[in-house]
Image (spheres, grey):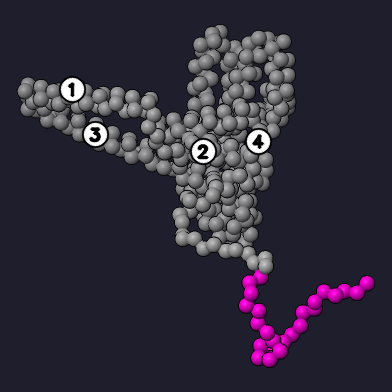
């Protein structure tokens, strides 16, 4: 069978036998040049991410990065806050005037107390704003690292890993890990490998700390619920432990949530729980139901303890996911059976 396909040939450009065809190619690709746009106008890349990562980013975006939108409730609360502020201002004015009317010394003492109160209020507001901005930066870093790793973008990976190292610059226990990552930034070209090295060196020890906090909180909740004589005490203790656990996990990963920051954190955790259906990734719902059923057969209070321990562990894992400044890449995200196997009668970590 003969091959009649044309073969490549060499020729000179000044050869008279060479003819130039000015007609366009039949399958020429079309190129469209558009004006430069902002990076926020580019199509989102979330569709290419892992479903678990999309759920985490959705919770972070709504919890930490969401912009204020006027709603009926927010407008009502804003108006109520304004009225309370005006009432407090009028009361303060009348109080200071009354003090001056009584004695000038009392008036000046009142002015000094008001100045101290205003100074403390400004400091508190600055601290709350800084904590919220820090949480926003961690959430943005998480999304940027996920996209850089997905695209295997070396320059973007180095830039975001430097931000990750800077996040823990004030933590002495991370000095060795930061030095290892700094060496890798200069040696590693592949963006995905660089992010994996940074995750293994910087975040794996923090993951172990966070998982230990979740295990301890779940154990405390399950034990206290099993021996508590009142359901109201159970509820108060569980809520307090969950709030403490979420705040502690945020601190482990570099967050410093104040009151406003904690509200945003609680919103992000609740959104992540609602998106994931309340079941931690990698856990079997049947395993949890069976574990609770066995404990319930032994004792109703023990069954309640196991159930509350599972709830605490789930909330802790959601807090771990939304507070972590990088996606899980080197290892899969932990599940309830990984952090609290004692709730299922396992020996790991017991």
Residue 118, which numbered label? 3
Q: Residue farthest to the top?
A: 229
Circle 1 crowding by C-alpha within 10 Å: few under 14, some 14–19, many from 20: few
The x, y position of residue 190, in whole percent, is 63, 59
Name the mark nearer the viewer: 1 or 2: 2
What's the distance in space between the residues labelled 3 and 2, CA to CA? 33 Å
> What's the residue at 50%, 39% (across, down)?
61
Magenta span: predominant SS is loop
Residue 60, which numbered label? 2
> What's the residue at 65%, 82% (across, down)?
20
Of the two numbered discs 4 and 3 on the same chain, state the one appearing first in sequence.
3
The x, y position of residue 280, in whole percent, is 64, 30
What's the distance in space between the residues labelled 3 and 1, CA to CA? 15 Å
The x, y position of residue 109, in whole percent, is 14, 29
Where disc 1 sits, the SS reads helix
Quarter-wise, where is residue 131 in the image? top left
Q: Nearer the viewer, residue 179 or 239?
A: 239
- 186 w.r.t. 117: above or below: below
Quarter-wise, where is residue 129 in the image? top left
Q: Give the residue number, with chain letter if any, for mark 1.
A: 91
Q: Residue farthest to the right?
A: 1
Where disc 3 sits, the SS reads helix
Of the two numbered discs 4 and 2 on the same chain, state the one appearing first in sequence.
2
Where disc 4 sits, the SS reads loop
What's the distance in space between the residues labelled 4 and 3, CA to CA? 45 Å
Of the two numbered discs 1 and 2 on the same chain, state the one appearing first in sequence.
2
Q: In the picture provided, is 112 more to the left or to the right than 329?
A: left
> Which stretch appears magenta?
1-25
Q: Nearer the viewer, residue 141 or 103?
A: 141
- 310 w.r.t. 151: above or below: above
Q: Give the residue number, with chain letter if any, for mark 4.
A: 334
Of the two numbered discs 1 and 4 on the same chain, state the one appearing first in sequence.
1
């Amino acid at each position: 069978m003969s091959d009649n396909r044309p073969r490549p040939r060499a020729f000179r450009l000044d050869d008279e036998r060479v003819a130039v065809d000015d007609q366009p190619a039949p399958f020429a690709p079309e190129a469209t040049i558009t004006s430069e746009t902002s990076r926020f106008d580019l199509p989102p890349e979330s569709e290419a991410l892992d479903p678990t990562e999309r759920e985490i980013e959705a919770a972070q975006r709504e919890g930490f990065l969401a912009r204020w939108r006027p709603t009926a409730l927010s407008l009502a609360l804003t108006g109520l806050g304004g009225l309370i502020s005006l009432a407090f201002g009028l009361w303060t004015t009348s109080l200071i005037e009354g003090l001056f009317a009584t004695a000038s010394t009392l008036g000046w003492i009142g002015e000094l107390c008001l100045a101290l109160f205003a100074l403390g209020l400004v400091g508190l507001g600055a601290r709350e704003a800084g904590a919220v901005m820090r949480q926003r930066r961690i959430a943005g870093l998480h999304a940027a690292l996920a996209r850089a790793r997905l695209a295997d973008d070396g320059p973007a990976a180095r830039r975001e890993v430097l931000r990750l190292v800077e996040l823990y610059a004030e933590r002495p226990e991370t000095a060795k890990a930061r030095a290892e990552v700094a060496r890798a930034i200069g040696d590693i070209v592949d963006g995905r490998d660089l992010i994996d090295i940074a995750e293994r060196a910087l975040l794996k020890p923090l993951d172990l700390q966070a998982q230990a906090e979740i295990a301890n909180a779940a154990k405390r909740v399950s034990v206290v619920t099993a021996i508590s004589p009142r359901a109201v005490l159970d509820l108060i203790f569980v809520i307090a432990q969950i709030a403490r656990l979420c705040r502690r996990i945020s601190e482990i990963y570099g967050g410093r949530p104040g009151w406003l920051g904690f509200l945003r954190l609680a919103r992000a955790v609740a959104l992540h729980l609602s998106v994931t259906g309340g079941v931690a990734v990698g856990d079997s719902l049947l395993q949890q139901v069976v574990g609770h059923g066995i404990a319930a057969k032994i004792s109703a209070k023990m069954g309640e303890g196991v159930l509350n321990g599972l709830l605490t562990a789930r909330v802790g894992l959601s807090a771990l996911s939304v507070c972590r400044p990088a996606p899980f890449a080197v290892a899969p995200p932990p599940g309830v059976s990984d952090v609290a196997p004692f709730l299922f009668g396992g020996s790991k970590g017991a």
